Image (tube, grey):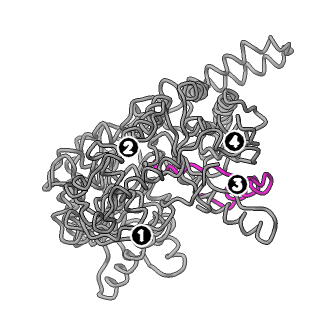
């Protein structure tokens, strides 16, 4: 059996000061929750200080998933009497055009539901660009919006998110530092990213009204917030790159009081985090030394055992040669450590109770189909727990196809005429709804249920390829997901209890959890939080008993794989293994050919991403000088989340 060790990635990352490469101050937080609390605290303090001076506070506010935590923290502070919004004035950054204010995707509706309805801000103090005015009046409105901000005394503090194209507000590539509030044509990447909110990119408006970069730079204080691994590359370019028209966030480098607030995941590409030895003196711990050797091997395109002292000196690692004067021994140590992380089928557990938590009904086979295949073949008692029903990702065309199947198949089951008539009537009602349905409209409960059952049937078909049956599938149908929209409810005690009850019932030896926090609409992250709280509750429940807490395995989703230095276990797959995994993915027909939420940058299907990711991991290890495999899945292990 391979020795399962606690992952280095589970240790707290040291928060170092910024370096000369960072052209704007960056604060790194352990998680998005602590980031949100800090921003909310700064806003509350500013309001209090301004009120003491007899001044009103003027805020610039964004929408999207990133600021929701800030708004929730401010609401809680308001309810606890810690902040008063009665004299606060707000200006929102942007709004889609055209867009009715009561539409599901409207930023007017977003702000009311997520913030304004829960605090005591006067309605007349709220300013949001309208998406429903005649286009001929947009230019006039934009000029008036600029005057209104000036009349209010200018914006004291503005909060920003950052798009994956580097935009702030809707200032797409090409927006200069002197631009003001205006109507703008949305970039293709922005529309793809927004596609999930509109149930398809084709439904996303092509234009928006936005504050300009110059308008934003007029604010006295700017805080840009970024969370999640998918934001790490653009954070790097905005913070360490040159100012340029392609990334409007780079213009924040010119502001004397701007800062980036990012969580650990969004900081991963910053030089001080990814390769700290290039920008500062480091203490060469075991983990950091190994990271540096793996990085160097890939950088110079030489296997680890072929590295020499000159390679280290030429690439900024001379201090490592002083800390570990015998470089040959260090390289051998890194090589053998990686070699020991390769776990063949015979090395994996047998006869154990295992729960695989799958956020969506296809993450199990996409992300760890090879591991699932191995666990089943080794005679483990495996339960796949599908946490959400995935209904929001099913196209209406699939519903039409299946109700047509029901109508055509009914007679084959010997149903009486009254039953077939009832099926036909229900089918007609569903078709009528789908025909009249507007883009982004929430499905009826009946349609949501049909879509959920489509995903459930596909999930069962997928695990059947790998030797499991419907009896090993649990559909948790967690409440937070069941909004009928991409936007989900917060994780509640009901969600946590569902996971806890399953742990209590099955008492697993191992659990597998999606550690990929980059999925576009945050479901993986929310499922992770629910499992984290349930595992803590379970640990308390089992304290003082003979029941052992499960070892936790973290896998990655469709978006990316663990980096070589992060992984604790590498599971090799032959071509036959990978082909079987792909066959299981193919059973998810509603996600085949064209998925509802494919992500903005990647046109490949999910099976292609899984194939390429597993092949790329194998190739990366091969280039380091390790044995050559056809494909590999990677995992991190830990005792707690």
Q: Which residue is mark 3?
A: 499
Residue 165 drawn at (x, y percent)? 29, 45
Which is in the foreground here, disc 2 or disc 4?
2
Which is in the foreground here, disc 1 or disc 4?
4
Determine the CA span between mark 3 and mark 4: 12 Å
Q: Residues within 10 Å of mark 3 (few under 14, many from 20)?
A: many
Labels 3 & 2 near each other (Cβ < 8 A)? no
Q: Which residue is mark 1?
A: 122
- Between 116 and 122, the one nearer to me in the picture: 116
Is 518 displayed left or right of 235 in the figure? right
Lower sequence index among marks 2 and 4: 4
Residue 208 drawn at (x, y percent)? 30, 45
| Magenta-highlighted residues | 490-518
- The kind of secondary structure element at disc 1 is loop
- The kind of secondary structure element at disc 4 is strand
- The kind of secondary structure element at disc 3 is helix
Q: Is residue 21 above or below residue 102?
A: below
- Between 315 and 260, the one nearer to me in the picture: 315
Which is in the foreground here, disc 1 or disc 3?
3
Q: Which residue is mark 4?
A: 384
Lower sequence index among marks 3 and 4: 4
Residue 541 drawn at (x, y percent)? 77, 67
Q: Residues within 10 Å of mark 4 (few under 14, many from 20)?
A: many
Residue 301 drawn at (x, y percent)? 28, 42
Q: Which residue is mark 2?
A: 624
Lower sequence index among marks 3 and 2: 3
Determine the CA span between mark 2 and mark 1: 62 Å
Lower sequence index among marks 1 and 4: 1
């Amino acid at each position: 059996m391979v020795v399962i060790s606690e992952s280095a990635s589970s240790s707290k990352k040291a928060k170092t000061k910024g370096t000369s490469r960072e052209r704007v101050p960056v604060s790194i937080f352990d998680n998005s929750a602590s980031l949100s609390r800090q921003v909310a605290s700064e806003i509350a303090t500013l309001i209090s200080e301004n009120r003491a001076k007899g001044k009103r506070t003027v805020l610039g506010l964004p929408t999207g998933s990133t600021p929701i935590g800030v708004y929730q923290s401010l609401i809680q502070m308001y309810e606890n009497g810690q902040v008063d919004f009665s004299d606060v004035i707000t200006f929102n950054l942007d709004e889609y055009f055209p867009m009715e204010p009561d539409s599901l995707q409207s930023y007017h509706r977003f702000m009311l539901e997520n913030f304004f309805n829960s605090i005591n801000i006067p309605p007349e103090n709220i300013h949001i660009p309208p998406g429903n005015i005649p286009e001929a009046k947009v230019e006039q409105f934009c000029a008036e919006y600029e005057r209104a901000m000036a009349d209010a005394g200018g914006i004291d503090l503005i909060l920003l998110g950052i798009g994956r194209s580097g935009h702030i507000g809707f200032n797409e590539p090409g927006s200069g530092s002197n631009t003001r509030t205006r109507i703008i044509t949305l970039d293709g990447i922005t529309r793809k990213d927004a596609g999930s909110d509109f149930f398809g990119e084709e439904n996303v408006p092509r234009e928006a009204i936005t504050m300009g970069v110059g308008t934003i730079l007029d604010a006295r204080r700017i805080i840009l917030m970024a969370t999640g691994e998918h934001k790490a590359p653009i954070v790097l370019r905005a913070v360490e790159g040159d100012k340029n028209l392609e990334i409007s966030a780079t213009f924040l480098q010119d502001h004397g009081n701007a800062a980036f607030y990012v969580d650990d995941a969004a900081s991963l590409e910053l030089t001080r985090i990814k390769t700290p030895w290039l920008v500062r003196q480091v203490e060469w711990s075991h983990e950091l030394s190994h990271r540096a050797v793996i990085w160097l091997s890939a950088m110079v395109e030489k296997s680890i055992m072929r590295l020499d002292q000159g390679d280290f000196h030429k690439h900024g690692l001379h201090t490592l040669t002083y800390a570990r004067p015998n470089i040959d021994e260090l390289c051998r140590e890194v090589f053998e450590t990686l070699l020991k992380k390769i776990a063949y089928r015979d090395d994996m557990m047998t006869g154990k109770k295992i729960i695989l938590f799958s956020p969506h009904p296809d993450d199990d086979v996409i992300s760890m189909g090879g591991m699932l295949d191995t666990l089943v073949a080794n005679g483990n008692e495996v339960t796949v727990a599908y946490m959400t029903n995935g209904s929001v990702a099913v196209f209406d065309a699939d519903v039409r196809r299946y109700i047509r199947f029901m109508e055509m198949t009914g007679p084959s089951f010997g149903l009486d005429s009254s039953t077939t008539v009832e099926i036909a009537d229900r089918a007609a009602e569903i078709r009528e709804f789908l025909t009249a349905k507007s883009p982004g409209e929430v499905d009826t409960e009946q349609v949501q249920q049909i879509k959920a059952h489509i995903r459930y049937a596909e999930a069962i078909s997928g695990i059947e390829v790998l030797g499991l049956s419907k009896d090993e599938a649990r559909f948790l149908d967690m409440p937070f997901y069941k909004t009928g929209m991409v936007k989900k409810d917060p994780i509640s005690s009901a969600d946590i209890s569902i996971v806890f009850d399953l742990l209590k019932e099955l008492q697993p030896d191992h659990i597998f959890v999606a550690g990929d926090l980059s999925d576009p609409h945050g479901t993986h992250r929310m499922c992770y939080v629910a499992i984290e709280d349930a595992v803590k509750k379970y640990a308390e429940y089992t304290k003082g008993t003979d029941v052992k807490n499960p070892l936790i395995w973290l896998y990655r989703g469709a978006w990316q794989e663990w980096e070589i230095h992060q992984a604790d276990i590498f599971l090799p797959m032959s071509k036959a293994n990978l082909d079987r995994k792909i066959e299981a993915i193919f059973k998810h027909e509603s996600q085949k050919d064209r998925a509802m939420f494919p992500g903005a940058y990647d046109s490949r299907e999910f099976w292609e991403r899984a194939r390429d990711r597993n092949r790329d991991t194998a190739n990366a290890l091969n280039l380091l000088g390790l044995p050559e495999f056809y494909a590999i899945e990677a995992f991190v292990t830990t005792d707690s989340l």
